[in-house]
Image (spheres, rainbow, N blue to C red):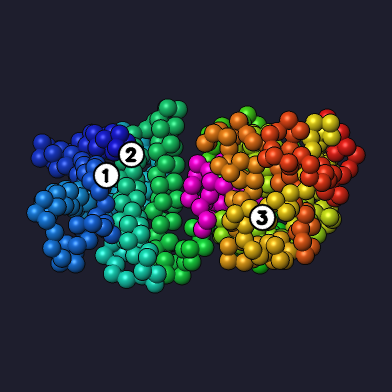
Amino acid sequence: VRPAASVMLVGNMLLHLRGSGIFSCVVSAIRGATAPFGLLMVMSTPVITGAGGSNARMRLALPTSDLNTLYVFQWVLLHLVGFACFIGPTILLELPVAIIDLFNPPRPGPGETWARLAKMLWYGMTVLRIVCPILMLRAAPNMFADQAKNPNTLRAKKWYGEYCVGELGASVMYFNAISVFLLPGQGPYSLLDVVIVATMLLESLRLLFFYGLWSLMLLHAWDDVDFKYECMARSTMSRGPVMKGLRQISGSQLVFLHAVQAGHYDPTEWCVTSSPIPTWMSNGALGVAQGPVRQFVIRPEMYENFNAFDFLDMHMEDLKLFSQDLLSMLKALPSSSTLFFPFGDVYKKGVRRPFLCLSCVDFDEEVHRLDGPKANSAFPTCNEQDEVALDVTDKVFSMDGCPEAFKAQSFIDALAEENGGAILSLFGQLVNKGGYQEAERPDLGPHYEVQVRDIRASRPLIVLRTQKTQKLPEGWMDLAQKDLLPSELRGPESKKAK
C-alpha cells in the first residue's frame, strides 16, 4: 500500500499542476499532495482508535511512565496529523469543490471536445466525490464509540470506524485523479489511455464497494451481528457436504471436529482454501490419503498444539472438546460401529496430524442421511500374511491412566464422562509408553492401528492391528487373534492386499 500511496502522492500533485499563475499552481499541487501525504503518515504509525497498552491508560487518565508517555505521544501525534491531512481536506476541501464542480462543470475551450462517455463518467466521479465525504461523516463517530452490545468488540468497532473512513477517503482520491483524465480537451483517447482509465475506474469502485461501503454496512449492523458464530463460520468451520449434514442431524455446530467421507476432500477446508498450490498438484486435505473406502475420516479442529502428530500430543482440554463433538457425531449416526486410531506413518499413510476413522454397519444409509457424496463401495485393504490383529481390551483397561468409566459401560457412554477424552491419548502409549520410539519421529514407529469395535456394546472390543514384525510388549503375540477388519469392512477387497 505504501508504494501505491507514494505514486499517488506524486501523481496527484502532477495532475493538479494547473492554473493561470504560480499561486494557483501551488495551491492545486498542495491540494493534490495533502491527502496522499496524510495516508502515508497514517500507514506509517500504529492505529490509535481502540489501541491498548499505555494509550488505553492515557485515555482513562491513568498514570504511565515518562518513557511510555513520550513514545505514545510521538506516534499518536504523527498519526493524528496524518489523519487530519488525509481526512480534513477530503471533507473540508474536496466536498465543497465537488459540489461547485457539479453545478458549474468545466466547458470545452476553443478547439476542445468533450466526448459523451467521458462527460458522463466525469459527472459520475463528481457525484461520488460528494457522496463519499458524506459517508465519511456517517462513519467517523464510530472511531470514538464508547460502547458496543458486546464489550469485547468495542476496540474492533473503533478500528473498523477508522478503516472505513480511510477507505472512503482513499476512494475520493481515486475519483479525483480519474476526473482529471476526463476533463474537456483530454481526448481523443488512445487504446492505452482507455485501458489506464478503465483500470483506475475498476480499482476505485472495488475500493469503494468491497471495502468502504462493506465496512460501513458492517458498522451499521454491528450490534446485531453474532460475532462469535460468524468468526467460527467464516474462518474456522469447514462447510463441506458431510459437515453440513452432520450439523443438521446432530443439532450441534461441531466446532472442534472436521469430518469427510474417505477419498472425498472438503474444498472448504482451510488447507485447501489457503494453499497457493493447485489441489491437483498437492492435496493435503483430510481424507485424501485414505482413498475412497467405506469410512468417515475425522480430525480435531482448533487445538492449541499445531505441532501435534497424534492425539498423544494434544492437551487434555483440547481432547475434551474434540470428544464432545465426536460423541455428538456418533449419536447422530446410529449405525456407527468401529473407531480406528492409526499410529505411525505406515497406518496413517504418511498423514502427520491427529485423526481417526469411523465405519458404520449401514454406511450407505448414513451417507444418504448426510446428503453427501455418493457412498464409497471399496473396502480398506489388509494383508493377512504380514499383519496380525490382537484382542488388547484387557491390556488397555489395565493401563495407568485409563478412565474407570470405560471398564464398566459402553465406549460411547464412557466417552461422555468428564475425562473420557483421555483414552484417545492413551492409545498412543499402547505399544511404547513414550509414544514414538524417538520424539517427533512418526516415521520410526511404532506402527499400528487401534480399533474400538462395538462402541455401543456394554463392553467394547479393542483390537490392535499391526505388522507381524512390529516389536510388541512381551507376551502380546500370545493374545487372542481377531479378524484384521471388523465385519462391516470385510468385503472382497479386504481379503488380500492389492
Mark 3 vs mark 1: in front: 3
Return the x and y of residue 10 as percentages of the image width and height: 24, 34
Instruction: Please say whether residue 92 is visible from this viewpoint.
Output: no
Return the x and y of residue 360 as percentages of the image width and height: 80, 54
Q: Is residue 467 magenta?
A: no
Left or right: where 7 falls relative to 68: right
How far apart in space, not on screen, are marks 2 and 3 (Cα)?
A: 62 Å
Q: In terms of depth relative to the viewer, which is nearer, 489 or 375? A: 489
Count neighbours of disc 3 (C-alpha within 10 A) and say few if under 14, some if 14 to 19, many if 20 or more. few
Quarter residue 27 falls in: top left
Q: Quadrant of the N terminus?
A: top left
Residue that carries the numbered disc 1 in the rendered image: 43
Dot label at residue 1: 2
Q: Are marks 1 and 2 in contact (CB under 8 Å)?
A: yes
Q: Amino acid at mark 3?
A: Ser
Q: Amino acid at mark 1?
A: Met
Q: Looking at the image, is mark 3 or mark 1 earlier in the sequence?
A: 1
Residue that carries the numbered disc 3 in the rendered image: 398
Instruction: Please say whether residue 212 is visible from this viewpoint.
Output: yes
As drawn, 360 above or below 185: below
Q: Amino acid at mark 2?
A: Val
Return the x and y of residue 118 as percentages of the image width and height: 40, 41
